[in-house]
Image (tube, helix red, strand yellow):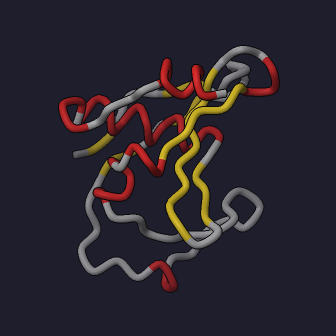
Amino acid sequence: MGKYHSIPDKTFTIEVHPYIGFIPNLNPNFITFNEDEVKAVFHVPLHVLLDPQKRSYHNFRDTGQLVAVFDVGRTVKIWGLTAMILEDVLKSIIVSNMETNVNETLSKN
């Protein structure tokens, strides 16, 4: 684990440099974060992120570009650049277990 490749936002105005790691016994209540940048800190089990029923795709601002949204329970949804990074990481690490049915999603809408 370590530095993941850089990912630009949809408008290519910023570039994010994600890091992948494992923190045993993580307690989100003890993490300090910038409230201007982050709404909340929480953890999601991997099996939830891999569940195709928890992932949908939406047309980003009517551009025709589909972006993932992870509905991880309660009232929590992971969307935007965070969802883009998460989906990219999951696809590159666990491609064989992750089914992305974008065409099926499009045909339902």
Observer-nearest residue: 30 or 65?
65
Residue 107 rendering spot, x and y as whole percentages: 58, 20
Find the residue positioned furthest to the front.
108
Q: Which quadrant holds residue 86? A: top left
Q: How many marks?
A: 0
Q: Residue at x 77, y 61 (%)?
A: 36
Find the residue positioned furthest to the left.
96
Residue 77 placement, left or right of 3: right
Find the residue positioned furthest to the right.
61
Residue 53 placement, left or right of 1: right
Q: Residue at x 21, y 38 (%)?
A: 97
Q: Which quadrant holds residue 48? A: bottom left
Residue 47 rendering spot, x and y as whole percentages: 29, 57
Observer-nearest residue: 82 or 54?
54
- Identify whether 74 is placed above or below 56: below
Quarter containing the C terminus: top right
- Identify whether 4 is placed above or below 40: above
Q: Residue at x 42, y 26 (%)?
A: 101
Q: Residue at x 81, y 21 (%)?
A: 62
- Identify whether 13 is placed above or below 78: above
Residue 61 rendering spot, x and y as whole percentages: 81, 26
